[in-house]
Amino acid sequence: MNPKRILVVGAGHVGLYAALRLSKKLSSLEAEVIVVDPQPHMTYQPFLPEASAGNISPRHSVVPLRRELRRCTVVSGAVTRIEHARKVATVQPIAGPTREIAYDHVIVAPGSVSRTLPIPGLHEHGIGFKTIGEAIYLRNHVLARLDLAAATSDPDVRRRELTFVFVGGGYAGIEALAEMEDMARDALRYYPELKPEDMRWVLVEATQRVLPEVDRDMGAYTVQQLLKRNMDIRLDTRLESCVDGIVKLSDGDSFPAGTIVWTAGVKPSPLLAKTDLPRGERGHLTCVPTLQLVDGDKVVEGAWSAGDCAAVPDLTKPAGAYCSPSAQHAVRQAARMADNIANVIRGREPVEYKHKHAGSVASLGLHKGVGQVYGIKVKGWPAWFMHRTYHMSRIPSFNRKVRVVVDWTLAFFLKREAVALGQLHEPREEFLEASAPVGSRQG
């Protein structure tokens, strides 16, 4: 028989885990697995705050696709259109003309992108926190603010540069805020010109609580811990404008800020709008518990999805509930989906995905955390240790596990690096200046 072609769109949590499992379960005579993603790596997003804070190397928070998916075909490019009626996807490689890839089964897992609002000034001054590039940029940006503040004698400039605003009180926002404040406070030992009280860290959250994934008392505990670190927590408050770096809040307050980080939620990838696949009201692909796409009451044969971009019914909750867009669900859905595709190829019936959410843990900086796992509430060092242990166990490949543990071990004995490598973002600037024609050089 001819091997079935399985096209995996996106190499995030779902795409990588599904492709890896399929390549192990199915022989080359049964299936060919093709993975398409613009990046040559999968980013393990739970490690972004620690990578940004310098607790682990940024390279160790990503998983190289070609190293892990040796039995798959990896295409570096972006899927620009999916025509499932023809079972064809249009791919734009990173170089060269577009090409069409035909398939028998497609896993649509491009993930999500930052959900932004039309807030004046956000496009010009906001920093996202969803990719490894954004994490590295934020680290360099924050440390550069310390350099600028230490170099100036103008109190207004210093106050602006040392004001850091984070918008969004979910896990991404809380962890990014806590880790970056921890890093900056640690770095101040090398800045005798600055004092910890010179820094102002502001959290802006539109609802009346943070960390909605845990009980209210654990969210309240998190707020209390942040307040003890002299952070400015604004609940039930919205960012209304940040034109020219002047932050204006719905509570009437206004102040200049040198850093504005946007972590207020995500939305499905725009790619989904360029497909003929069924979507729900919020733009997610509609799935049945077997992780097959469904159009009304009819299963769409050969189309599968999971993770952030899919609405997957949660069978552990009342009817109408969907699985949360967490890494915990994504990796388990990927495994179930891969097994189901193998079942279908071998003429068996797919099995429904069912997993009761175990809970969540969040890091609040070095040796600090909060969590709620199987109903048990943990705080402080135990929660931080649980957070690290769990995510170390979940990151793919033994290679990455060892590298992360080595980074953590060295951090116990060596001081954290606190230097900005801002030239990474404009690496050719100095060369362009040096190589410019004599008449056009500045100065």
Image (spheres, rainbow, N blue to C red):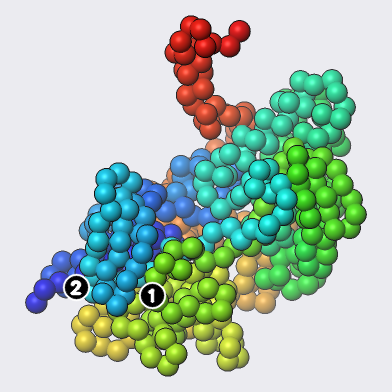
Q: Amino acid at mark 2?
A: Lys
Image-based side of 117 in relation to 222, left or right: left
Give the residue at the far right of this rendering.
252
Q: Confirm whether residue 23 shows in the render.
A: no
Q: Residue 216 occupies which quadrant of the picture?
A: bottom right
Q: Where residue 124 appears, x then y in whole percent?
A: 66, 43
Which one is in front, 171 or 6? Answer: 6
Indicate which label's residue lies in the foreground, 2 or 1.
1
Instruction: Label 2: state its secondary structure.
Output: strand
Provide the residue designation for mark 1.
276
Q: Horizontal and vertical percent for residue 171? A: 66, 60
Q: Which residue is mark 2?
A: 4
Vertical comparison of 319 with 346: above or below: below
Circle 1 crowding by C-alpha within 10 Å: few under 14, some 14–19, many from 20: few
Which residue appears at 82% of the width and 29% of the height? 158
x and y, in percent, of residue 179 in the image: 68, 47
